[in-house]
Amino acid sequence: MGGLLAFARLIDRMNEIIGKSVSWLILLAILVSATNAVVRKMFNISSNAYLELQWYLYGAAFLLAAAYTLQKNEHIRIDILYGALSRRKQNWIDLFGHVVFLLPFVCLMLYLLYPYVMISVRSGEMSTNSGGLILWPAKMLLLAGFILLFLQTVSEIIKKIGIIRGLIPDPHAEGTGTGEDDPVVEEGAL
């Protein structure tokens, strides 16, 4: 299990670096949007490339940060019953959700996306809009985002098993659940 936990930490580090880095794409998208608006209003010049670049940047930020968001346990969830449960039960629910729902969904998306992206890359697919950008880089980002999400899902499954077995501390333990049946974890178990 120690090797798997080390692998999970490697995935976590990679997705943390990528997640924090792509957050700058939002600022870049805002700057492109503002520049496009100013140029359009002041000089009556417009370009579909600016508009498409904006959605490329927003899409890249969303897709490439999805794995980091999963790692930080920040995805939106309906918390009516979940929040009242102990951390141990929450971890079991998370593990079940990752194995039964998220992992199959991500695998299905990868299975469907790969040929879709490869056809686009091989054909050099371009936007149908006048002055538009090439499309295959955006489609590659879609595939890359789901690859990162797949890796992070595997990491989360490994960590949840480690937490449930008491091998590692629960990073989300403080302030959640009742804690009545949470496992006691020795310090330095990492």
Image (cartoon, helix red, strand yellow):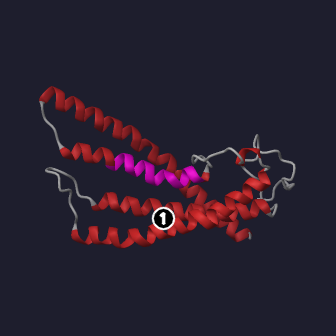
Q: Quadrant of the C terminus?
A: bottom right
Vertical order, 166 against 53 (above or below):
below
Task: State the extent of the magenta-drawn residues as a range.
Answer: 56-70
Q: Work out whether residue 18 can be spotted.
A: no
Q: Is residue 8 above or below residue 32?
A: below
Q: Is residue 87 left or right of residue 78?
A: right
Q: Residue furthest front?
A: 80
Q: Is residue 46 left or right of residue 69?
A: left
* Mark 1 crowd level (few <14, some 14–19, many ≥20, 10 Å Cα): some
Does 17 sit above or below residue 98?
above
Q: Nearer the viewer, residue 10 or 93?
A: 93
Q: Is residue 114 left or right of residue 5?
A: left
Q: Position of residue 187 (x, y in %)?
A: 84, 53
Quarter occupied by the N terminus = bottom right
For label 1, the residue is: 147
Mark 1: amino acid: Ile
Q: Position of residue 71 (x, y in %)?
A: 60, 53
Picture coordinates of residue 50 (x, y %)?
23, 43
**Which residue lies at the image location 72% right of the left edge and 44% below the top edge?**
83
Q: Position of residue 177 (x, y in %)?
A: 78, 45
Name the main secondary structure of what is drawn in magenta: helix
The residue that appears at 47% across and 62% down in the rendered structure is: 146
> Can residue 48 be spotted in the picture?
yes
Q: Residue 66 versus residue 107: which sits nearer the camera?
A: 107
Number of numbered discs? 1
Q: Please check the rendered image and state whether residue 68 is part of the magenta-colored stretch, yes or no.
A: yes
Give the residue at the far top of this rendering: 42
Task: Please tell me whether mark 1 sits on a helix, a strand or a loop.
Answer: helix
